[in-house]
Image (cartoon, rainbow, N blue to C red):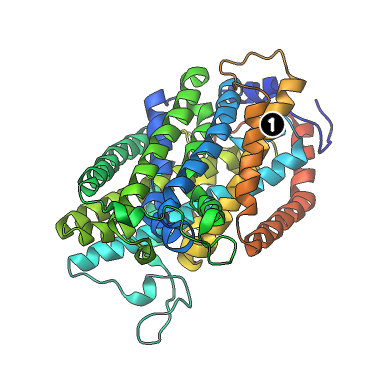
């Protein structure tokens, strides 16, 4: 049994042994489930909301280049994730891989950082979902009380301010109940919604392409205003950093490796397949969108619906809003799913209270973890504005991706003989390019976003030294504990 040290790493064998315990989560997911999970998580706020903001404020028609840049960076990272997910098919994603390479203290920090990527991502998506739901309801002549449709102090017509975004909080609550009841039902619902929204997106691309005004693409890279990040090539970089939020969903697949039937084969298929599909869709939508509407006019909460109305297909905008609602729903579902699995893995190692590692005896899900995350995320969705949430998600995700690429380099040195069903090609070039590209995108983000990240990580360190370190030491001293909650 290991004594305490923040730098002691769990071996891949230890992690796999934990994943194989009878109390662990059941392996029920297939490669198709993983691809649907990844696409469902990825195609959401990025394509239905952030495309307009990024084009209008940063990249102009060059938004297509921003998506290509983001997709290339994610491609390097996805290859690293694929090797790790196939080699260490256990719940926990980046947290689990960090514990096997950089030690307990670093693993805690990454686990804390992943709250920005998953829980805050779900909250961000829920706020976007709320906006599209209000728009769809208004089309039908229904209107929610304005005070219950936005974060507190958000200005409303007439000089009033909002109190709480109730639709966003309700979405999180409903998805939490669905996830608590088990993987089979949630993956089937997710797959149906993914198919519908992809059909709607392809319809938009196909119909919109016939009405594109190529003159709106010129110049592809608008002249910089004199400020870094406002158009020009720096705007392409800033735009890539902003829309990077749109790509994070594919990584959710790595949190599901511990629940996959054949993770060595299916995890790489799910990671790379969902990223490839999502990137192609993003580039196509960005090209059509900026070819239909002048980029300066795209700074609206529903840019795709606006584009449809511009070409005189107002009735199709209803279908677009439905697709957006479905897309945002699947994104939030996947993010909540991933966050619960990360907390499950951290509690399994003693860094969080044991309740987070208990598996429900009937539903076979980490119910306590899922419910707790759902409550907190619902409150955040109802209380925090979307712009603040989105910036935190992007920089937190980029930091986690840098750690993943570093983990590949470390494991190739510390465990060179371990079986690797999938191997990153072009070692060590691909992981290094992944690190550099993610760091470059981070540098393109505003300075206040870096400050918020520093504050968030400082809070995480305080919790670790105040609770996590001692709790993990006591957990190891006590030995294995049953993790299935007693039947009621």
Considering only vertical position in the picture, is 55 above or below 469? Answer: below
Considering only vertical position in the picture, is 144 above or below 423? Answer: below
User: Which residue is at 36% across, 40% downward?
Assistant: 281
Measured as percent of width and height from the top left, residue 365 is found at: 48, 36
User: Which residue is at 20% across, 46% downward?
Assistant: 210
- 140 relative to 419 in the view: left or right: left
Measured as percent of width and height from the top left, residue 224 is found at: 53, 62
- 402 relative to 225 in the view: left or right: right
User: Which residue is at 57% across, 30% downward?
Assistant: 81
User: Which residue is at 37% across, 32% downward?
Assistant: 184
Using the rendered view, name the quadrant where residue 353 is placed: top right
Considering only vertical position in the picture, is 85 above or below 151? Answer: above
Give the labeled residue for mark 1: 407
Element on which disc 1 rests = helix
Using the rendered view, name the quadrant where residue 183 is placed: top left
Considering only vertical position in the picture, is 385 above or below 436? Answer: below
């Amino acid at each position: 049994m290991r004594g305490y040290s923040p730098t002691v790493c769990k071996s891949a064998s230890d992690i796999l042994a934990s994943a194989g315990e009878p109390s662990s989560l059941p392996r029920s997911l297939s490669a198709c489930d993983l691809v649907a999970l990844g696409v469902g998580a990825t195609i959401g706020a990025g394509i239905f909301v952030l495309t307009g903001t990024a084009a209008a404020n940063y990249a102009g028609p060059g938004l297509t280049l921003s998506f290509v840049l983001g997709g290339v960076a994610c491609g390097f990272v996805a290859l690293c994730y694929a090797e790790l997910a196939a080699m260490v098919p256990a719940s926990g994603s980046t947290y689990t891989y960090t514990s096997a390479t950089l030690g307990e203290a670093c693993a805690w920090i990454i686990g804390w950082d992943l709250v920005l990527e998953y829980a805050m991502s779900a909250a961000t998506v829920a706020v976007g979902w709320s906006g599209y739901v209000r728009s769809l309801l208004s089309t039908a002549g229904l209107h929610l009380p304005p005070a219950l449709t936005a974060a507190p102090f958000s200005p409303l017509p007439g000089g009033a301010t909002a109190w709480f975004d109730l639709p966003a909080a309700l979405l999180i609550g409903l998805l939490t109940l669905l996830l608590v009841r088990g993987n089979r039902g949630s993956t089937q619902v997710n797959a149906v919604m993914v198919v519908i929204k992809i059909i709607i997106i392809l319809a938009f691309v196909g119909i919109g392409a016939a009405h594109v005004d190529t003159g709106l693409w010129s110049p592809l890279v608008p002249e910089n205003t004199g400020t870094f990040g406002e158009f020009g090539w720096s705007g392409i970089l800033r735009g890539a950093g902003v829309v990077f939020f749109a790509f994070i969903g594919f990584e959710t697949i790595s949190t599901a490796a511990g629940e996959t039937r054949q993770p060595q084969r299916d995890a790489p298929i799910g990671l790379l397949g969902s990223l490839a599909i999502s990137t192609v869709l993003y580039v196509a939508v960005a090209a059509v969108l900026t070819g239909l509407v002048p980029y300066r006019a795209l700074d609206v909460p529903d840019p795709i619906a606006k584009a449809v109305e511009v070409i005189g297909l107002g009735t199709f905008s209803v279908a677009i809003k439905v697709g957006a609602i479905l897309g945002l729903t699947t994104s939030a579902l996947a993010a909540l799913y991933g966050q619960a699995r990360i907390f499950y893995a951290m509690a399994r190692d003693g860094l969080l209270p044991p309740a987070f590692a208990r598996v429900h005896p009937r539903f076979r899900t980490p119910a306590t973890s899922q419910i707790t995350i759902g409550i907190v995320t619902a409150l955040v969705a109802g209380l925090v504005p979307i712009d603040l949430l989105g910036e935190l998600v992007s920089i937190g995700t980029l930091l986690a991706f840098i750690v993943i690429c570093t983990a590949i380099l470390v494991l190739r040195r510390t465990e060179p003989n371990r079986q690797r069903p999938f191997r990153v090609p072009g070692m060590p070039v691909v992981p290094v390019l992944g690190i550099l590209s993610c760091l470059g995108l981070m540098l393109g983000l505003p300075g206040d976003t870096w400050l918020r990240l520093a504050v968030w990580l400082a809070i995480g360190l305080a919790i670790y030294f105040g609770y996590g370190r001692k709790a993990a030491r006591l957990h190891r001293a006590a030995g294995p504990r049953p993790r299935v909650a007693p039947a009621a």
